[in-house]
Amino acid sequence: MTTRCQAVLQEVMRGAKELPTLPHVIAKILRMTTSAESSAADISKLIANDPALSSRVLRLVNSAFYGFPRKVSNVTRAIVLLGFAKVRNLAVTASVAQMFTGLERPGEFSFRRYWEHAVATALASELIAKRVCPARADDAFVVGLLSELGKAMLAGRAPDLYRKVLAEVNELEIPVNQAAAQVLECDVASLGSEIAQYWNFPELLVQCLKHYRAPQKAPPEYREIAQCVHVADTLAGSLGWLGAGEKFVADVDGVALMELKVDEAGLTQDANTLLKSYDTSAAVLQMAA
């Protein structure tokens, strides 16, 4: 990491330290759902300790996306019906929305565009992973949802630096990640990874957030998920859900497609499924309102 990149990270992290304890709650939830010693009651209690988070999770559980015939009235019941991993994903989704809602800077950062891209990338990551590594589909969802964490933190906690990145995007017509690497000597994917590490998120998240833009550089044990999110990011953009500040669809890594054994027919199928899933995810999208 260059001296310039370290300075950028320090400026962003000063802002990150001012955030409420929400990231720590996310970190606990992520770790508890991977622990064999954690029960539904343990996780339910953790979520219930934050009434706003509990309310948001139940709102998602009772949305059209899941279509339960009867209302689910508590988090423990939601875990029984959906499983640890699904409720974890809902809690992380609700938490991220709560953390960044209100981060709207007209002409600079559109939270709405950020959130639409995050949701589409998460859904697409899960779709692709279900076909190529089904046991890790829920992990792929979380990585996809948080894939632009670095960009959101840069825009929200160091807006002057983000403006410089946007100027480079507009002048050179390049993606935000590339512009940040040139202007700040620190791409937003690496920035997101450093923030995740600071918040004590699991190593899978730290590594995949760092490498999903160039998944072949990911450690072997995390490469498959990084590849799924990489392809999902491009798929979301190609369907119109470009991230905040983006003007172009990112190029897809041909090696990632080959190793995942994803062909044009598979991508077309995923695109059609994503469009349908996105239409039923209104409750998730409304969290950006």
Image (spheres, rainbow, N blue to C red):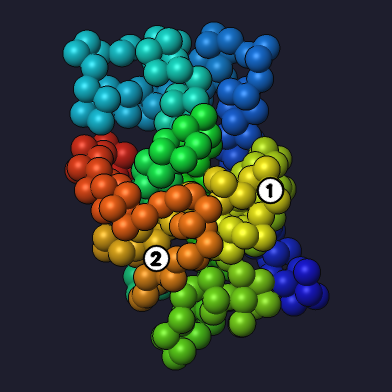
* Residue 179 rendering spot, x and y as whole percentages: 54, 79
Mark 2 or 1, nearer chain start: 1
On screen, 220 above or below 42? below
* Residue matched to label 2: 244
Q: What SS does tag 2 mark?
A: loop
* Residue 210 rendering spot, x and y as whole percentages: 63, 57
Q: CA distance from mark 2 to mark 1?
A: 30 Å
Give the residue at x 25% y 43%: 273
On screen, 256 above or below 1? above
Q: What SS does tag 1 mark?
A: helix
* Residue matched to label 1: 220
Give the residue at x 22% y 48%: 272
Give the residue at x 62% y 24%: 34
Residue neighbourhood size for the residue with mark 1, other residues' Cα within 10 Å, grouped as few (<14), some (14–19), many (≥20): few
Q: Is any part of residue 149 visible from this angle?
A: no
Instruction: Please count the marks in the image.
Output: 2
Q: Closer to the camera: disc 2 or disc 1? A: 1
On screen, 111 above or below 37? below
Identify the mark at residue 114; answer none if there is no mark. Answer: none
